Every structure is written in C-alpha cells, then in structure tokens.
Image (spheres, rainbow, N blue to C red):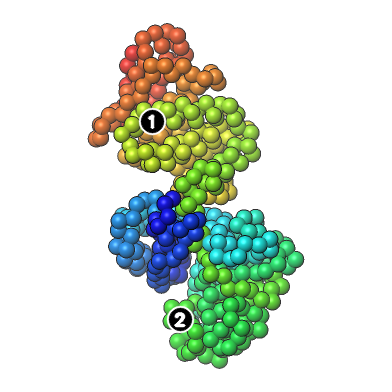
Amino acid sequence: MQNGTLLAAVDLGSNSFRLEIGRFDHGLIHRTEYIKETVRQGNGLGADGNLGAEAMQRGWDCLARFGERLAGFKKTQVRAVATQTLREARNREEFLARAHKILGFPIDVISGREEARLIYQGVAHTLPQSDERRLVVDIGGRSTEMILGRGLEAQTMESYNVGSVAWSMKYFPDGQFSLRAFEMAEIAAKAVLDEAFDIYRSGLWDTAYGSSGTIGAVGDVLTAAGWPPGGVTRGGLDWLQDRLLRAQSADRLKIDGMKEDRRAVIGGGISVLRAVFDLLDIEHMEAAQGALRHGVLYDLLDREQDLTDLRSTTVRRLTTKFNADAAQAQRVSKVSRQLFLMACSGMPRAESERLQRKLEWAAQLHEIGSQISHGDYHKHGAYILDNADAPGFALPELHRLSQLVLGHRGKLRKLEADFEDRVFIQQLLCLRLAVILCHARREPDLKGLQLESGAEPARLFVLNCRTGWAQAYPQSAYLLQEEVLAWQKTPWTLALAGL
C-alpha cells in the first residue's frame, strides 16, 4: 500500500449508512471525509422477514450518493459491508443485486462475529496500545456486539439480536415513553443478553468501551448536560431515562446534544444499554472513537498481504481442525494455480493474484469433509464452510468457497452457482482438473500440458497434452475424458487435444 492512497469503507447499518474515506500514511489511516445518512432500513423489515419497497429504495438512494463520491476509486480501495438487517432479510439478494450496481462496488453481508471482530479492530486502532484487557460494546440498530480483547487482538466475540431500532419499534411504538415500557424493554434485553454474563462478566476486563451508535449519542447528551465528558455512567443513564419519561414521547423530547435522527430510537437504545450495565456490573463506559467502518479500513490493508490476511489464517485453522491431508492439499493448490495462470494469462497481475489466492483456499479446503464421509466428503465440506465461524470472511465469500468445494468433483448441475460468472467457472475448472491430475496423491507430470481459454464470448477451454502423455498416464487420461462429458451438461465446453 502506497502512502497517500485513499481507502473507503461503506457501512450499511440497520439505522444509518456511513461512508468513511481515509488516507493511508505509514501504517495509519487518517480521515479525509465522513458521510452519515439515516436510512432506518431496519424499520422496513416486515413480519415476513422481507425488506419493504420503501426501505430498499431509501437504501438505494443513499448508495447512489455514496457511489458518486466513490467514482474513480479502484476495487481494492473500497469495501462495503452490511450487518444485521441484511443478515435477516429473506429478500436481501434483490436489494444487494441492485445496490451493487448503484454503488459500483460489491457489498459483503458479514456474520455477527465478523462484525464484532471488525468493530474491535476499529476501536483498538484508535486507542493507545497497552496490555489492558478491553471490553468493547456496540449497540446497533438490530444487534449488539460484545468483544473481549487485548491490544489489536480480539479474543472473544459475540453478536446478540437486540438493538436500538428493533427495541424502539417493539417497546416504544409511536415513540411513547413510559416506565412500564422501559421495564419491559430492559427485561427483554436481559433475556437475550443473559449468556453474556458468564462470558463478559466483571473481572475479565479492565476497561469498558462503547463504540458508535447508541453509546456515542448518550455520551454526547450527557456531556452537553454537564456530566464528565468522554463516557457514560450508571447515574447518567438514570438521569437520561428520567428526561425521556418527563417528555413522554420522542416528538416532545427537547434535549441538548441529541441529534434529530437519534430521537426515534433513543428509547430502545437506552433500554439495551441499561441492561448491559446491569448484567456486566459496569459503572463507567468510555466512548470510543473507532467503529465498524474503521475496522473495515484497516482490514483492507491486511487483505493485501497473505501473511497478514486473517482469511488465510482461518483456512489453515479449518484444515487443521478437520485433519485434511496437508500434502494433497498443497499439491492440488499448486496445480490449480498453475492451470489458472495458463487459462487467464491476459488478466491484470493484481486481479490474477487475488483470484489465485481464493482458488488456493478452495484447494486447501477441498477435503475437509473427509472426516465425516469418504463418499460424500465434498458435500460435507461445503456444509462446513456454509456454517463455519470463519473470521475474516464475508458470508457470500464463504458461500462461494463452499460452492468450489462442493463442485470440485461429481456432477456440476448440483451447484447453485451462476454459470454466467466466467471467473468462478475458470476457478472451478482449474480446481477440478487439479484434483484429477493429483488423483494418485503424488506430484503429477505437467510437462507439455497447457490449458487455454477461449476469448469472450466463447465458452471454451482446451487442455493440450503432449504426445504419449495419455499412454503414460491412462487413468488420468480416462478421468479427463469423463470430465469432458461432465461439462457437456453446462453452457461451457472442455476439449482435449493430444489424447
């Protein structure tokens, strides 16, 4: 990463969408621009689990404005992530397909634990480095993340389905405040957060930090009212709840330091925050400057290098956990990358290296289901990836890996994959060919083998073999001929030359 490079993070939260742009300078990222829009997409999630048309349109309109600002940015300079609302939405693909086109960049729906990890990264990079044990809490619109960590390392992470938007809609309809409503909202929040008591209890951390959203808003109000700046206290929460009860409704609430967009969700936010204070016996919580979007920016730096890319560490952890054959995984990785380089020789180097790394991950993981079943290990491997706790990976990214693992052998029509996606098809073919060529679990003879890809729009791959190769390796030649037949049932064609 060159000093002076601009990086951007887009956070599609349940209450607000945010765009953070920063400039990279000697390992640090300094803000150059920040845009926040209150979209309240979480309000548009219906009882059927679908996002309503108006909520989707609000999101698209906001992303169009963000997209205009990001014009000229390269793909490697921008990452957009979506959180709880789009994790829940049954029709999220409808929203995301159009959102991708409007924004101009792909949008990753991340798991709750991955969101928690990135939040911690954002907070930790804005704090002085020390050995203190940190508790970080982020109360968002539809989820609350809690993390224990030290320095830059998040050690324990969890996400709970409770947040300011969801609780405001459920317990403070029409913005009406009452003592009974606050009591019910707190009891319900504690019921969801109950398991956090043992995991994050007092004594396991030295300092509690609150990130973004609700905690930042409460801190601003308390500071404006004369409370000590920089944090939230139990007494301050009691005082603020009393102010809400006096106002009786969000419409009548007039209080210094509270932004207009926060009034409608402050009741739910305070209820959840009070529940956290009670459960974890917190007396004071520092307001942190870092948040999810900052963690996304620093994660962009790590993704550039394989040695620091957390996804590579996650892949190694999974292969070890499921006792995959490391030597075979290495052979298949090496051969699949060689084939990919042959087939995609005209691709820009940076793009080719990025795609090779993902292909290598699939190769490393292709046998992780073998401990469950010998015959259907590819199916079990795909299931593991679709349901694994995989730090560093977005959910669609992990599913794409699962489809490569599922499709590395057997019939191709079982895949949910888009056969119009040329890059995926190239990766899949190279992985399948590598598995065939390494079937004997020894280094294959690739001398004279060349994989060629027809120029678009042609959907043709040709594998050239040297004279005598088929006679020297008859089983490999047979498996390759079977592979030709497998691709005949797809829109793509594999041809063999020299066999």
**Label 2 sits on what residue type?**
Lys
User: Badge 1: how crowded within 10 Å, few (<14), some, or many (20+)?
Assistant: some
Quadrant in the picture for residue 116: bottom right
Towards the viewer: 410 or 222: 222
Residue linked to disc 2? 259
Check the image and name the residue furthest to the bottom: 246
Q: Which disc, if any, is residue 123?
A: none
**Label 1 sits on what residue type?**
Leu
Q: Position of residue 406 (x, y in %)?
A: 48, 35
Q: Quadrant of the C terminus?
A: top left
Residue 274 seen anywhere in this rendered image of the structure: yes
Image: 188 above or below 252: above
Q: Is residue 180 left or right of residue 206?
A: left
Is tag 1's residue or tag 2's residue first in the polypeptide sequence? 2
User: Tag 1's secondary structure?
Assistant: helix
Q: Position of residue 418 (x, y in %)?
A: 36, 41
Towards the viewer: 181 or 455: 455
Check the image and name the residue furthest to the right: 203
Residue at left offset 25%, top offset 35%:
456
Image: 261 above or below 52: below
Residue at left offset 46%, top offset 58%:
25
Residue 139 seen anywhere in this rendered image of the structure: no
Residue at left offset 45%, top offset 33%:
407
User: Tag 2's secondary structure?
Assistant: loop
Residue at left offset 54%, top offset 55%:
114
Distance from disc 1 to disc 2, alpha carbons, whole Å, reads 54 Å
Residue linked to disc 1? 341
Check the image and name the residue furthest to the left: 457
